[in-house]
Image: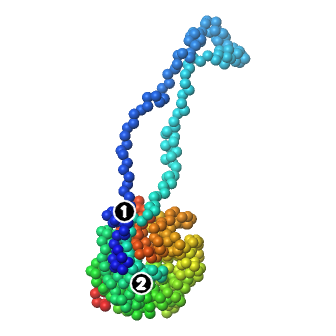
Amino acid sequence: MDAGSHSISSGKNSAAAVQRPPLQEAGSRPYMPPLSTTSRNPSAKCYGDRFIPDRSAMDMDMAHYLLTETKKDKENAAAIAASPSKEAYRRLLAEKLLNNRTRILAFRNKPPEPENVFAADTVSSHQAKPAKQRRYIPQSAERTLDAPDLVDDYYLNLMDWGSSNVLSIALGDTMYLWDASSGSTSELVTVEEDKGPITSVSWAPDGRHLAIGLNSSDIQLWDTSANRLLRTLKGVHESRVGSLAWNNNILTTGGMDGRIVNNDVRIRDHAVQTYQGHSQEVCGLKWSGSGQQLASGGNDNLLHIWDVSMASSMPSAGRNQWLHRLEDHMAAVKALAWCPFQSNLLATGGGGSDRCIKFWNTHTGACLNSVDTGSQVCSLLWNKNERELLSSHGFTQNQLTLWKYPSMVKMAELTGHTSRVLFMAQSPDGCTVASAAADETLRFWNVFGTPEVAKPAPKASHSGMFSSSFAHIR
């Protein structure tokens, strides 16, 4: 497909991958023959639990003599037994037993050592469970799709994967939806040339409504199930909107003007809170899982942590009041990822002049660790099922790197993209990761594996709220 075509189709080398069901492992499980009974080796020695004496090794005459003592011997024994002399007893004992080396019963072969099966089972039952085997991580993409006209801009956020298992990706002026369940692709909208290109995209929690930020500073809200534009937010920013983040019914937007605005989509006067702390473009926005803290990263190399309770308690000062202002990064901070298993842990990544992944305690503002990755950090994703972190990079290897947390030991490096991997998105089940790069390809990786117990997809509990809210607002 030529680069000017506005569609997402299978890559040249992915015909076989497209035929496979989506979100499945690249290869089928190898065939294993059933277990068969093997014949016993007749030459092998087998020891049972009975031992039969070997009569050829016995001295039958001596045995008969010892068993049928003479009358003299009996009289001596009776005399000694009646005598209090211990010395006589020892002499008779040495004569009859200690100096007699003849074996009454003898065995030709030494019996084997017993196998203490029951003891071994008892010990193992009390031991801790064996260490979990390291899972197999495929080194190649499960599927590759063409993504022509993908804007090569580090500061934008052009891809997101919703809770309804639909991936949205902006290619130039057009927004496409790829249904991971069926593998089908549809076009949602192509914006007017004077408003485009599309600069950011984010799914609402219900997986049905989609927010689209434009180069013209407008923000569009779409009902994807009805393919209908519900509302356009105007005047929120003075220039392009490069980052979006949802917190229930609040849509937070970040612009090139450095402003961060909370928009309540249920009301006509939607701009309810403004955070001002960045002097340049806001290129990263992420709400914590609890919805209490917002992380923002900018082209001014700053990272801010904003707290909802602080802003609500001081509305007049909320425009400037951040909880933490962190200046450790030496380049733009775009990659942000809240930890799913520790609510106050945030991972951030810096641009080409920084190349570091940093970990923060957002309650105290302390930097817990910093790792130099050697290349531009474009995006970060946590594994929802294991303590792992995935990063995507720019120059020079354009790779995805899987890290073990907290040791930050590299578990795998996934290569295939030929240009910087600008965006990553995670499937609702947390297993598959989609990566989009400046080489105009979209690749799917089964990097996080399959959880032991699959978690059900979250229910669309906000669909009614959005429909009723937008019914009378335009």
Q: Is mark 1 on a helix, strand or loop?
A: loop
* Mark 2 burial class by Cα count in 10 Å: few <14, some 14-19, many 20+: many
Residue 288: percent from left, percent from top: 46, 77
The quarter of the rendered structure image containing the C terminus is bottom left
* Mark 1 burial class by Cα count in 10 Å: few <14, some 14-19, many 20+: some
Left or right placement of residue 432 versus residue 118 in this view: left
When the figure is inspected, residue 30 is found, relative to residue 197, above or below; the finding is: above
Residue that extends furthest to the front in the rendered view of this protein: 2
Name the residue at 34% across, 65% down.
Answer: 15
When the figure is inspected, residue 35 is found, relative to residue 195, above or below; the finding is: above
Left or right placement of residue 102 versus residue 392 in this view: right
When the figure is inspected, residue 458 is found, relative to residue 107, above or below; the finding is: below
Q: Mark 1 = which residue? A: 24
The quarter of the rendered structure image containing the N terminus is bottom left
Residue 225 appears in the rendering: yes
Residue 334: percent from left, percent from top: 50, 79
Residue 202 appears in the rendering: no
Q: Earlier in the sequence, mark 2 or mark 1?
A: 1
Q: Nearer the viewer, residue 100 or 20?
A: 20
Q: Marks 2/1: CA distance?
A: 31 Å
Name the residue at 41% across, 82% down.
Answer: 200
Residue 391: percent from left, percent from top: 50, 71
Picture quadrant where residue 24 is located: bottom left
Name the residue at 40% across, 68% down.
Answer: 444
Q: Nearer the viewer, residue 211 or 137?
A: 137
**What kind of residue is marked 2?**
Thr
Q: What element carries label 2?
A: strand
Q: Mark 2 = which residue? A: 199
Residue 443: percent from left, percent from top: 41, 69
